Image (cartoon, rainbow, N blue to C red):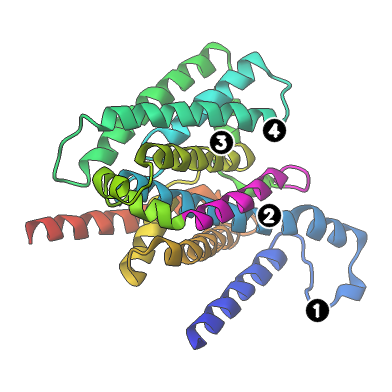
Amino acid sequence: MLKKIILIIFFIGLIFSSIFIGLVDVPPFDINTWTSQQHLVLLASRLPRTISLMLAGASVSVSGLMMQNIMQNKFVSPNTIGTLDSAKLGIVFVMICLPHANSLTKMGIAFIFAFLGTLLFLLVSRYVVSKSNIMLPLIGIMFGNIIGSIASFFAFQYQLMQNMTSWLQGNFSIVMRGSYELLYLSVPLFILIYVFAYQFTIIATGQEMTTNLGISYEKMRLFGVAIVALTSSIVLVSIGSIPFLGIVVPNLVTLKFGDQMKKNLPLTAYFGATFLIICDIIGRTIIAPYEISTSLIVGILGSICFIGLLLKEGRGQRG
């Protein structure tokens, strides 16, 4: 109970810090003296930014946990099996064919591409036979790079490369009121995952066990892939790409608390949001008054954690 209270207090402290740290000084204990500019900064920028950090961090981490259960491999995530790259191809398609489309349309088309791309990788993965957990994500990264190259080719052809790169880099400094609200759709998706957590845990045991328990293995797998593709598309369209978060956080939670999915879902969401807020605060303060992109900080810290997980996996296989 004490640990839960400490975690809650720590998270509240992070939220408080995220809201009141920035270039424009907004004194937290002097509300009556705030100028109209300070009110505007708080309501139009700081609050949306903090909320988007929480929602994006939780969504990406939970999506990674879902994919690891679906694929029965702890090193897969939407970043490493082509889901995000397929969604990026969908966004390039929108930029070329529907340049004036709204965010909801962009998200819908990105979802279709992400879903189909993930299904294609699932088909490819059936022919991968290896005792190493690392082989499947390596193939997934190559698969994603092929799709990403196709997206880049069309972006170059239509002179959209700079636009695509700047839009999808995962920079929270441009989050404003009116540009992040799509992320709220991730909340009902999280509830849906939690409701079906038992079934998703069962499919991680394999097709034979799942069928014996009266659960349709293929239908639940498709359902899980659809949720992950939709969640990934929402985050990509709203914020951009956030590397390593979907691999590192679920693995660290599983190492500490076991592999029971229903228990790990809120923990994964909590630590994903916490990690992303910490990275954002570091990016805002390390060279203040300038900012470093949050995705860059996540990439640096996440890659260190990822290398540590790979080394641990290698030692475990040799043992």
Label 4 or label 2, whichever comes before in sequence order: 2
Label 1 or label 3, whichever comes before in sequence order: 1
Name which residue type carries label 2.
Arg
Which of label 4 and label 2 is nearer to you? 4
Q: Residues within 10 Å of mark 3 (few under 14, many from 20)?
A: some
Marks 1/3: CA distance? 36 Å
At mark 4, the secondary structure is helix
Name which residue type carries label 3.
Leu
Image position, residue 291 (x, y; %): 60, 52
Residue 145: in sight, yes or no? yes
Which of label 1 and label 3 is nearer to you? 3
What residue is drawn where x is 54% and y is 27%? 112
Image position, residue 184 (x, y; %): 67, 50
- How many numbered tags mark residues here? 4
Question: Is mark 3 in CB contact (under 8 Å) with mark 4?
Answer: no
What residue is drawn where x is 31% and y is 66%? 255
Label 2 or label 1, whichever comes before in sequence order: 1
At mark 3, the secondary structure is loop
Which of label 4 and label 1 is nearer to you? 4
Residue 124 shown left or right of residue 313 in the figure: right
Name which residue type carries label 1.
Phe
Marks 4/1: CA distance? 37 Å
Extent of the magenta region? 176-196
* The quarter of the displayed image where residue 168 is located: top right
In the picture, the disc for residue 29 is 1
Q: What residue sits right under mark 2 in the picture?
A: 49
What residue is drawn where x is 72% and y is 46%? 181
Q: Residues within 10 Å of mark 4 (few under 14, many from 20)?
A: some
At mark 2, the secondary structure is helix
Q: What residue sits right under mark 4 in the picture?
A: 103
